[in-house]
Amino acid sequence: MDLALEDEFLARQLPHNLEAEQAVLGSMLIDQNCIKDVMDKLQPGDFYLQQNRDIFETMYTMFSYSRPIDPVTVVGEMQKNGTFDENTTQNYIIQLMDITPTSANVMEYVALVRGKSLLRSVATAAGEITSMVREGSGDPEDVLEVAEQKIYAVRQGRSSQDMASIGTVLSGVLENIEQLSAEGGRLPGISSGFSAIDAKLSGLNKSDLILLAARPGMGKTSLALNIALNVGKNSGKTVAMFSLEMSKEQLALRLLSSEALVESNRLLTGELRESDWMKVAEAAGVLSRADIRLDDNPLLTVSDMNAKCRRLDNLGLVVIDYLQLMSSAGGSMKHSGESRQQAVSDISRMLKIMAKELQVPVLCLSQLSRANEKRDDKRPMLSDLRESGAIEQDADIVLFIFREDYYSPDSDKRNIAELIVAKNRHGETGKVELKWMPEFTTFDTLEKRFGEG
């Protein structure tokens, strides 16, 4: 190939820096101390040249299993996994070590490799988006949604198209297990602020769709607000709350009552004692420091919520109140029998996809049908979910709130709520007890836990 044609061919290639890729691999081969730092920053897909990618992926897998990494062991592993070429690989590995005099600048080389990889991902996403636009098929809003998803995936360092080898996935899994073990059994998820709930669910975990359902008046909005406030105060993460029923001011008032432990009716009427003002002022300070974002637009679709959440940095939890009020992708919620059930099913499926894409727990509230009120035992069951469709299937965790004193005012379990874990993809089902404080519209933890199953 003539030099001019070769230059033109290289110019058409996607962004890459072969010298930086070689310097990264050479540094890892001559200095094992830098390997961990490199593994924290790069993935095999960040390497442009296939041979470089094969070498790095081999070292990545070896690192996952704590195997020693040097030129001899890497060659041996590549022979086992079938990526070793007798004619070129060994000479190439020797060459990598020869052209890398020192590993001192390895993180500079890593930054160059990562930067070029990011540009390639942007170029790929842009090409796919342009193809969609040129084809002219599909609704423009749907095209925009897909385009946003592709760019968000690039920003999060994930490719929506790439398949991952089990060795690459296991590396992250083993690292997480090792970290949890070193920290003495720390919760894998974000704490809900209720120790009994955390013990059942192992916290609120990334990509989980958590359904919290109850009959009206049981306190599902209150519990969701309690959890949102606890996460906002204690995790340092941002909480996004979408309320399709209550206004932002009503939500803020209930959060204030819950945090200050001042009766909500006093806050509504303004009839506060002098001691109440001190509690309210202190609670307002706590709430202001928590990064809780409120949205009370009743016409939001899942796509709207997803787009708003993508723009939030450090997102930790999404709360939606409530499922049956949400608009479908095509507009308002349909109200006729089967079409309504299909709309709710579509929304629940989109919520699960949103949780996976954002990599945060999504807590969605839901109404229950009146079926439980016709039974002697009025505790809710999965079949009581209204327009259930795919809700039960899509949700990773299904929680029900039940208060016996709601149906039997003379019950000896006055102001005690059962949180029934009806489905738990990560562990056991069962129940936990919570203390219900109606004057503050808030829940608290009881030390006593009871009755599995």
Image: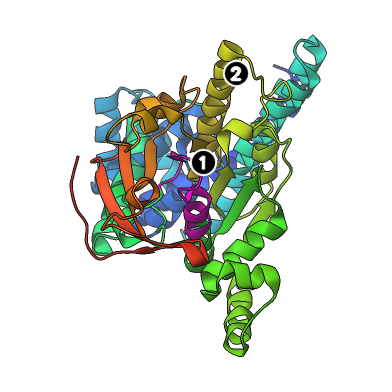
Q: Can you see residue 317?
A: yes
Say which residue appears at 18% left-offset and 44% top-offset: 452
Work out which residue is located at the far front of the displayed protein and give it.
410
Amino acid on which disc 2 is placed: Arg
**Dot 1: element:** strand
Q: Quadrant of residue 64?
A: top left
Of the numbered discs 1 and 2, the one sitting upstream in the chain is 2
- Give how far apart the Cα atoms at labels 1 and 2 are: 17 Å
Q: Is residue 361 magenta?
A: no
User: Which residue occupies the foreground of this view, 11 or 127?
Assistant: 127
Residue 407 shown left or right of residue 111 in the figure: left
Residue numbers of the magenta segment: 205-227
Q: Can you see residue 164?
A: no
Q: Report the disc number at residue 365.
A: 1
**Dot 2: element:** helix
Say which residue appears at 29% left-offset and 54% top-offset: 411
Find disc 2 in the rendering and name its residue.
340
State the quadrant of the C terminus: top left
Q: Report the disc number at residue 399.
A: none
Residue 28 appears at what percent x and percent y?
40, 51
Q: Residues within 10 Å of mark 1 (few under 14, many from 20)?
A: many
